[in-house]
C-alpha cells in the first residue's frame, strides 16, 4: 500500500482527493491535446474563412449537463467522506485539546495533562477543541483531519486510530511569531498500556503550584519567556529574580538588578527598560489584563528558588 491507513478517515478523504485529481488530470491532458489538434487542423492556411455557428441548443445543453454531472461526482465523494467527521460516536474517549500561543495541551477526563496526544489503538477519540487566545488549527495529516480552534467557540474533531505508532500534529493556522514551532504528536498504543499511562499523574513541582505560575501560564507568558533558560522572544524566566541585567532605558544602557519594582514595571510598561539584545515593541502592556494581586503573585513565584 502506497499510503498508510492510520485512521478511519483516510480512505474516504483519499478517494475524494484522487477522484478530483483524476478528473483534473483528464481535462488537463484532454483539453491540451484538443487545443494542439485544433491549431493544426483549423489553422488559417487550411481554413481561411471562419465558420460561424449560432444557436445550437443541444450543444448548450451538453456543455451544461456534463459539467454538472462531473461536479456532482466530486460533491458526492467529498460529502460521503466529510459527513461522518461531524458525527462522533457517543462512547468515544473524550479529551480536551487546548491550543494557545504556541503549544498544544491535551487534558484527559481524570485531570491528566499531556503535551502529546496519547490514545488507545482502535478506539474512537473525540477531541474537544479549545483556544485560549487566537485562532489555531489542529491538523493531523496522517489522519486526514483538520479543524480550526477558535476562542469562545468550542468545536470538536474525532477519529479512530487504526495504526500504532507516532504521527505528527501541526497548527495549520498562522498564529504569530512561533507558529511554526506549534507542533506535537499523536502516540497510538495498546489499550492496556494506555490505561496504565493514563493512571500515572505526575506530581507537579512545588514551584508550579504557586498561583503566580498559573497566572504566567494562563496569559501565555511562557510562549515568549522560557522557564529553562533557553532564548525565545524575550528573556528567560529562569533565575530571573535578583539577576543583574543590562537594560536600555530611552536608548541609554544601564545596569538594573531584577527586583519587585522592575518586574512590575516590565509587566505594565514593557518597552520602558528593554533587556539588551532583545527587541522593543513585541510585548503589550498588561495594565488592563492583570490585577495588582496577580502581579504580586508573579513576583512571589519569581522569588522562589529553582529546584534541582
Ligand atoms: Cu497555532
Image: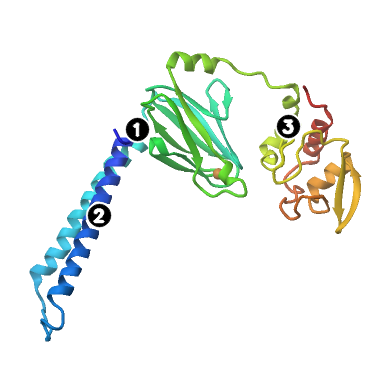
The first of marks 1 and 2 along the sequence is 1
Near-viewer residue (50 or 111): 50
Image position of 304 (left or right of 177): right
Label 3 and label 2: CA atoms lie apart by 55 Å
Near-viewer residue (278 or 154): 278
Label 3 and label 1: CA atoms lie apart by 42 Å
Q: Is mark 3 within 8 Å of ligand 1?
A: no
The first of marks 3 and 2 along the sequence is 2
- Count residues near mark 3 (Cα–Cα under 10 Å), then give few for <14, some for 14-19, many for 20+: some
Image position of 240 (left or right of 106): right
Q: Residue at point 50% right, 32% down?
A: 185
Q: Which residue position holds label 2?
A: 25
Q: Residue at point 55% right, 20% down?
A: 110
Residue 217's spot in the image, x, y percent? 68, 35
For residue 6, which quarter of the picture?
top left
For residue 180, which quarter of the picture?
top right
Q: Can residue 151 be seen in the rendering of this structure?
A: no
Is 110 placed above or below 36 here? above
Q: Which residue position holds label 3?
A: 213
The secondary structure type at the circle numbered 3 is helix
Residue 76's spot in the image, x, y percent? 23, 46
The first of marks 3 and 1 along the sequence is 1
Residue 174's spot in the image, x, y percent? 54, 50
Q: Residue at point 48% right, 30% down?
A: 186
Quarter of the image with the N terminus in it: top left
Q: Which residue position holds label 1?
A: 4
- Assess whether mark 2 and mark 3 are in contact (beta carbons under 8 angstroms): no
The secondary structure type at the circle numbered 2 is helix
Is 173 placed above or below 229 here? below
Residue 190's spot in the image, x, y percent? 43, 17
Amino acid at each position: 500500500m502506497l499510503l498508510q491507513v492510520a485512521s478511519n478517515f483516510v480512505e474516504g478523504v483519499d478517494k475524494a482527493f484522487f477522484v478530483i485529481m483524476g478528473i483534473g488530470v483528464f481535462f488537463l491532458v484532454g483539453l491540451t491535446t484538443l487545443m494542439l489538434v485544433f491549431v493544426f487542423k483549423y489553422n488559417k492556411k487550411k481554413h481561411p474563412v471562419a465558420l460561424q455557428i449560432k444557436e445550437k441548443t443541444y450543444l448548450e445543453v451538453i456543455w451544461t449537463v456534463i459539467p454538472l454531472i462531473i461536479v456532482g461526482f466530486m460533491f458526492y465523494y467529498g460529502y460521503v467522506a466529510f459527513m461522518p467527521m461531524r458525527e462522533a460516536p457517543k462512547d468515544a474517549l473524550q479529551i480536551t485539546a487546548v491550543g494557545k500561543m504556541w503549544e498544544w495541551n491535551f487534558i484527559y477526563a481524570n485531570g491528566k495533562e499531556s503535551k502529546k496526544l496519547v490514545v488507545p489503538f482502535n478506539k474512537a477519540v473525540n477531541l474537544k477543541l479549545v483556544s485560549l487566545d487566537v485562532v489555531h488549527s489542529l491538523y493531523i495529516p496522517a489522519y486526514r483531519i483538520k479543524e480550526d480552534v477558535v476562542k469562545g467557540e468550542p468545536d470538536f474533531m474525532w477519529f479512530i486510530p487504526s495504526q500504532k505508532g507516532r504521527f505528527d500534529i501541526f497548527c495549520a493556522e498562522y498564529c504569530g511569531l512561533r507558529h511554526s514551532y506549534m507542533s506535537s504528536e499523536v502516540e497510538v498504543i495498546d489499550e492496556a498500556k494506555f490505561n496504565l499511562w493514563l493512571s500515572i499523574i505526575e506530581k507537579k513541582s512545588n514551584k508550579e503550584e504557586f498561583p503566580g505560575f498559573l497566572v504566567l501560564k494562563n496569559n501565555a507568558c511562557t510562549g515568549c519567556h522560557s522557564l529553562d533558560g533557553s532564548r525565545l522572544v524575550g528573556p528567560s524566566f529562569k533565575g530571573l529574580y535578583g539577576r543583574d541585567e543590562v537594560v536600555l532605558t530611552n536608548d541609554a544602557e544601564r545596569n538594573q538588578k531584577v527586583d519587585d519594582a522592575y518586574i512590575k514595571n516590565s509587566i505594565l510598561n514593557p518597552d520602558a527598560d528593554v533587556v539588551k539584545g532583545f527587541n522593543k515593541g513585541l510585548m503589550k502592556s498588561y495594565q488592563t489584563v492583570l490585577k495588582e494581586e496577580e502581579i504580586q503573585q508573579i513576583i512571589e513565584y519569581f522569588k522562589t528558588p529553582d529546584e534541582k
